[in-house]
């Protein structure tokens, strides 16, 4: 008879996985050292999550912000510029840094053909682009291709966030994020 899942333990494991990957990286992720760090066994991780990839995807899902809620009430360009700026600042400082570091690693890994992270990465990007496209349509109905504009913003800001996490250059990357946002959202 299969052992029932302890949902509280499962939630604790998911939180620990994100911290572990942020500290040790995704490239050489192995279940044994991960399990030891989490105070469990690789067998129990498989019991809870079936595969290493599913464990990572579920851990990331618990960390993903509610993007539609962040931009749902945006009705003018000033509010959208403010939200995008705040989103960048929050997600590259403090507690959010851990999940952003892991997400950037997963997005990179998703580029490989047949990556087990492709579906998760595609859904994360599609959610952000769709949400931002909707906000752009609300604030300016004259934008020729709001989806392309949203893609430019998301891709540009993701690169700036990655730059800041790698270099630690807060002042330069803040200026770059503000410039990108101000140039695109008028």
Image (cartoon, rainbow, N blue to C red):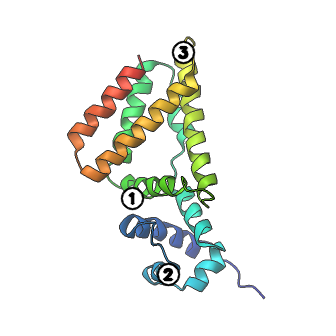
The extreme top residue here reads 142
Name the image quarter holding the C terminus: top left
Foreground of the two, 12 or 139: 139
Q: For residue 143, which numbered disc appears in the image?
A: 3
Image-quadrant location for residue 6: bottom right
Q: Residue sitting at 42 percent across and 32 percent down?
A: 83
CB atoms at circles 3 and 1 under 8 Å apart? Answer: no
Q: Residue sitting at 50 percent across and 25 percent down?
A: 149
Q: Position of residue 61 (x, y in %)?
A: 57, 56
Q: For residue 98, which numbered disc appears in the image?
A: 1
Near mark 1 (Cα within 10 A), the count class, few <14, some 14-19 or many ≥20, is: some
Name the image quarter holding the N terminus: bottom right
| Residue 45 can be seen in this image | yes
Instruction: Indicate the secondary structure of the residue bearing disc 3.
Output: loop
Among the two numbered marks 3 and 2 on one chain, the one whose residue lies closer to the N terminus: 2
Instruction: Indicate the secondary structure of the residue bearing disc 2.
Output: helix
Question: In screen coordinates, is 6 left or right of 69?
Answer: right
Give the vertical position of 107 relative to 25 (above or below).
above
C-alpha gap between disc 3 and disc 2: 50 Å
Foreground of the two, 17 or 109: 109
Among the two numbered marks 3 and 1 on one chain, the one whose residue lies closer to the N terminus: 1
| Residue, disc 2 | 35
Among the two numbered marks 2 and 1 on one chain, the one whose residue lies closer to the N terminus: 2
Instruction: Indicate the secondary structure of the residue bearing disc 1.
Output: helix
């Amino acid at each position: 008879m299969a052992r029932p899942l302890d949902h509280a333990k499962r939630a604790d494991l998911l939180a620990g996985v994100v911290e572990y990957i942020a500290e040790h990286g995704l490239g050489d992720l192995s279940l044994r050292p991960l399990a030891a760090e989490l105070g469990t066994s690789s067998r129990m991780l498989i019991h809870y999550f079936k595969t290493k990839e599913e464990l990572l995807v579920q851990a990331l899902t618990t960390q993903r912000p509610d993007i539609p809620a962040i931009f749902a009430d945006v009705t003018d360009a000033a509010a959208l510029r403010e939200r995008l700026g705040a989103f960048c600042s929050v997600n590259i400082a403090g507690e959010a840094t851990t999940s952003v570091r892991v997400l950037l690693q997963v997005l990179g890994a998703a580029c490989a053909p047949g990556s087990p992270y492709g579906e998760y990465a595609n859904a994360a990007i599609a959610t952000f682009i769709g949400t931002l496209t909707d906000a752009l349509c609300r604030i300016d109905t004259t934008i020729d291709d709001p989806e392309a504009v949203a893609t430019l913003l998301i891709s540009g800001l993701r690169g700036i966030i990655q730059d800041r996490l790698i270099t630690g250059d807060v002042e330069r990357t803040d200026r770059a994020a503000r410039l990108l946002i101000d140039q695109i959202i008028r």
